[in-house]
Image (cartoon, grey):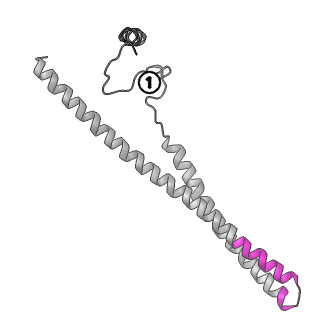
Amino acid sequence: MAWDEWEQLKADAATRQPTRMQLNHPPPEPGGAGSGGQQGDLAVNRTDLAAIGDAAYELRRDFGRTSEHARAASQKAAGGLKAQGFALGSALDHVAARWIEQSRSLLDATAHISNHLDFTKGAHAGDEVHIAATVSNIATLDAGFDERKGS
């Protein structure tokens, strides 16, 4: 790259967008905080997370209870049919065994959803504390610079 080419690239870059340092807030976005929208990149609605977590917990609780009843009834019927010599008893026993596997998978998945949302809520709370502490430190630093300037 020739020196003239480098100088031309620098001049082009300078005319596109001035470079500035910005502290304590993200750059303003269209539809941002000033126009009634949300501020920042990450937005978590705790009400929505809580509703999803509650629904997953209720599904796990209700399905667990109902699933256990269906399993017990199916195994009892399978045992009765087997005892009377019906081949259908073995087939029903196989269905009950598969039911147990599938219902455990669903129960595990709903528990995972509920637990993950609890973890997410805690992680975001920790992030909020960290961000507040960092911004507070920047404000303290700015105040120190203002004091040195005599403002």
| Residue 91 lies in the magenta stretch | yes
* Quarter of the image where one finds residue 142: top left
Residue matched to label 1? 33
At a point 78% along the width and 80% down the height, the residue shown is 93
Q: Position of residue 94 (x, y in %)?
A: 78, 77
Task: Tell me the quadrant of the picture where the C terminus can be found.
Answer: top left
Q: Position of residue 45 (x, y in %)?
A: 50, 40
* Quarter of the image where one finds residue 79: bottom right
Front residue of this view, candidates 148 and 43: 148
Q: Position of residue 102 (x, y in %)?
A: 69, 67
Other-residue count near label 1 (Cα within 10 Å), few / some / many at <14 / 14–19 / ≥20: few
At a point 31% along the width and 21% down the height, the residue shown is 21
Question: Which residue extends farthest right?
Answer: 86
Question: Which residue extends farthest front?
Answer: 2
Q: Position of residue 76 (x, y in %)?
A: 76, 83
Secondary element at tag 1: helix
Q: Main secondary structure of the magenta part?
A: helix
Task: Tell me the quadrant of the picture where the N terminus can be found.
Answer: top left
Per the rendered image, the range of residues in magenta is: 81-100
Front residue of this view, candidates 146 and 57: 146
- Give the answer, above or below, for where 37 lies relative to 114: above
Q: Amino acid at mark 1?
A: Ala
* Quarter of the image where one finds residue 68: bottom right
